[in-house]
Image: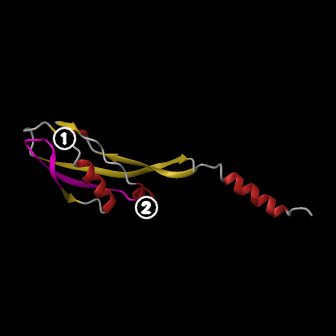
Amino acid sequence: MKTPLRIVLTLLLFLALGFVPSLHASDVVIIDGKYKQGAVVAPDPEFPIHGQHLQEGGQGIYRLVINTKTGLADEVKILKSTGYRDLDASAVMTLFKWKFQPGTIDHRDVLVKFSLTGWSRGLH
């Protein structure tokens, strides 16, 4: 018994789709260098995977309250939210890792921009 042409074509289509790269947006997190002045350690936040999938984006302003003895942030306040809890959480948790020279600064307001730009190809 011969296999119908429709089944053969369907199987070929599924095999071909397995090798086609998927399209996804490129994630970008931007903190202007002026906000990092005087910092000894100032990593950028990661763009949460969940936020990428939901195509979240926005910018938030966060106030670091710096301990003048240690140079570390004792507190990070959200002055303006990105509008997305996971983006704000990523920014806040990362800003707690920032370190300044002790005794040089007592607070700093930081603008963090989360954006999805263009589309790039990636493998499944």
Quadrant hosting residue 61? bottom left
N-term-proximal mark, 2 vs 1: 2
Q: Position of residue 77 (x, y in %)?
A: 17, 57
Please tell me whether mark 1 sits on a helix, a strand or a loop.
Answer: strand
| Residue type, label 2 | Leu
Residue 41: percent from left, percent from top: 23, 38
Residue 69: say if magenta: yes
Q: Is residue 12 left or right of residue 4?
A: left
> Dot 2, how many residues are within 10 Å of its Cα: few (below 14), some (14-19), or many (20+)?
few
Q: Position of residue 59 (x, y in %)?
A: 29, 55
Residue in view at x 65 percent, y 52 percent: 18
Q: Which residues are magenta?
A: 56-76
Residue name at image x 15 percent, y 44 percent: 72
Query: Which numbered circle lies on residue 99?
Result: 1
Horizontal placement of 61 versus 102: left or right?
Answer: right
Mainly helix, strand or loop, the magenta region?
A: strand
Mark 1 Cα-neighbour bin, 10 Å: few <14, some 14–19, many ≥20: many
**Which residue is tagged 2?**
54
The location of residue 92, given as percent across then percent down, is 25, 53
